[in-house]
């Protein structure tokens, strides 16, 4: 069994909730979220191995149903390997717009319970329900309420960990998947943690795990008995102290409902390496359109535009430029990304992946927005807002820049483009 499978294998389904006194932190995690959303429209696939991800030769698994996971398939695995492990699996292309819409509805359920919601991704969040106890009941009752509402309103399931700290709550939700609820009592944290493998601790990657194994430390309990000074000597001051605290269940971090998105981006891995600058520029345009739409949907604008360029030998470079004002306009993002690509001197170099990202985000309503280059103040903004409205009604791709329409018309559009996100 792989390290990943050991950390994420379903734990025993709990019986009646344990004592939740002092356990105001919930970690809610959707079960196989992308797959679950797809099955809402494809109910005939329930019970079968289903994989969401790019179907090309360089595609990557975005999500796998629990039936597919039973064959060893997991997210971030190359699709070619996933197909070898589970040739009978049904592979579906990802639809991030659809996942975002369901995620927004799920987060509305969270916020109806408490304003203290810290989103970690589309499908998981921390909640502090201390202030909701008088209105809704004990934390375990609130956790079950959330599970019921997610199932009834969205038709998908989630797993919830209930604990006194964020770290333990997240571990609890992992151990009770899928479709589970697990309470770790405040006075039972050590008993819960110490039998787990050291890889369960935040901050323990494969290299750190190898170091700990070399020291004979395979469980959290074994690590907890090592003096902090020894851990700091072997792992460094910060990591050694951090792991010692976690091993005893100490995690002072509070739920932060104001954690902003750090960046919004998109990237594309080509099915075959591309050295045609015009194809690369069209791909940068497509990615800029996607990033601009995501920015506007999230209500953010950003000042820093970056490009990611990965060559055929996997060497990767990034280039970035900070604008004078924040922007959420695809035209500005594209022109900046194109200039960064051209300045990188890779116009005749074969690329396997390109990416566009906007960072240094701020709420769009609170900051002036960068105008499109050499354009009136309202022309491109009105055009892109109109595209957003069409996309919302008819789906992304119903209206596109002419350059992208031409690409699809030329030779049925097969220019080597593969997996995107």
Image (spheres, grey):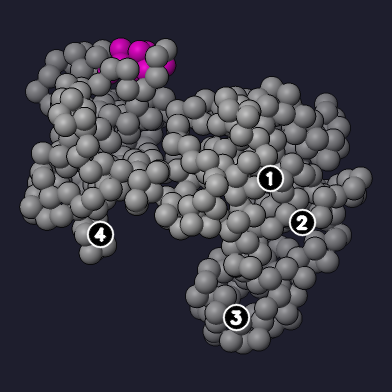
Which mark is drawn over residue 212? Answer: 3
The residue sitting at 52% across, 51% down in the picture is: 87
| Residue 388 part of the magenta segment | yes
Q: Are marks 2 and 4 in contact (CB under 8 Å)?
A: no
Viewer-side label of 1, 4: 4
Closer to the eye: label 2 or 3 = 2
Q: CA distance from mark 2 to mark 1?
A: 16 Å
Q: Position of residue 65 (x, y in %)?
A: 61, 44
Residue placed under numbered mark 1 in the picture = 27
Please give the range of residues in magenta: 384-392
Q: Could you give the CA–CA distance between mark 2 and mark 3, rounded to whole angstroms?
A: 24 Å
In the rendered image, which residue does mark 4 sit on? 316
Find out whether residue 48 is within the magenta segment. Answer: no
Q: Of marks 2 and 4, which one's residue comes earlier in the chain?
A: 2
Labels 2, 1: front one: 2
Sooner in the amino-acid sequence: mark 2 or mark 3: 2
| Identity of the residue drawn at 47% across and 49% down | 61
Prevailing SS of the magenta stretch: helix
Q: Are marks 2 and 3 in contact (CB under 8 Å)?
A: no
Check the picture and name the quadrant holding the N terminus: bottom right
Determine which of the numbered discs, if any, sits on residue 132 in the image: none
């Amino acid at each position: 069994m792989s390290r990943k499978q050991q950390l994420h294998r379903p734990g025993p389904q709990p019986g009646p909730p344990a004592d939740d006194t002092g356990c105001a932190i919930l970690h809610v995690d959707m079960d196989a979220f992308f797959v679950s959303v797809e099955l809402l429209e494809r109910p005939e696939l329930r019970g079968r191995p289903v994989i969401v991800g790019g179907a090309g030769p360089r595609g990557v698994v975005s999500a796998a149903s629990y039936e597919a996971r039973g064959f060893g398939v997991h997210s971030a695995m190359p699709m070619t390997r996933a197909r070898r492990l589970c040739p009978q699996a049904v592979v579906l292309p990802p639809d991030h717009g659809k996942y975002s819409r369901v995620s927004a509805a799920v987060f509305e359920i969270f916020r109806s319970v408490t304003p203290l919601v810290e989103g970690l991704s589309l499908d998981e969040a921390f909640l502090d329900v201390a202030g909701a106890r008088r209105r809704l009941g004990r934390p375990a009752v609130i956790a079950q309420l959330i599970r019921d509402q997610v199932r009834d309103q969205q038709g998908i399931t989630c797993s919830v960990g209930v604990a006194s700290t964020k770290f333990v709550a997240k571990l609890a939700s992992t151990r009770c998947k899928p479709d589970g609820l697990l309470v770790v009592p405040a006075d039972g944290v050590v008993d819960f943690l110490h039998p787990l493998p050291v890889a369960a601790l935040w901050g323990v990657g494969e290299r750190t795990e190898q170091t700990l194994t070399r020291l004979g430390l395979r469980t959290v309990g074994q690590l907890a008995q090592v003096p902090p000074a020894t851990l700091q000597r072997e792992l460094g001051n910060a990591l050694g102290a951090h792991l010692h605290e976690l091993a005893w269940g100490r995690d002072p971090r509070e739920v932060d409902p104001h954690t902003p998105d750090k960046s919004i981006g998109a990237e594309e891995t080509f099915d075959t390496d591309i050295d045609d600058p015009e194809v690369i520029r069209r791909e940068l345009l497509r990615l800029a359109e996607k990033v601009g739409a995501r920015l506007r949907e999230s209500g953010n604008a950003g000042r820093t535009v970056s490009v990611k360029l990965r060559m055929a030998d996997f060497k990767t470079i990034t280039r970035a430029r900070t604008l004078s004002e924040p922007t959420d306009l695809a035209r500005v993002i594209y022109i900046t990304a194109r200039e960064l690509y051209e300045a990188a001197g890779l116009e005749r170099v074969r690329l396997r992946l390109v990416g566009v990202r906007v960072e240094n985000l701020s709420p769009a309503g609170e900051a002036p927005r960068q105008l499109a280059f050499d354009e009136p103040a309202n022309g491109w903004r009105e055009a892109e807002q109109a595209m957003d409205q069409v996309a919302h009604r008819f789906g992304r791709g119903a209206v596109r820049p002419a350059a992208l329409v031409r690409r699809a018309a030329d030779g049925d559009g097969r220019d080597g483009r593969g997996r995107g996100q």
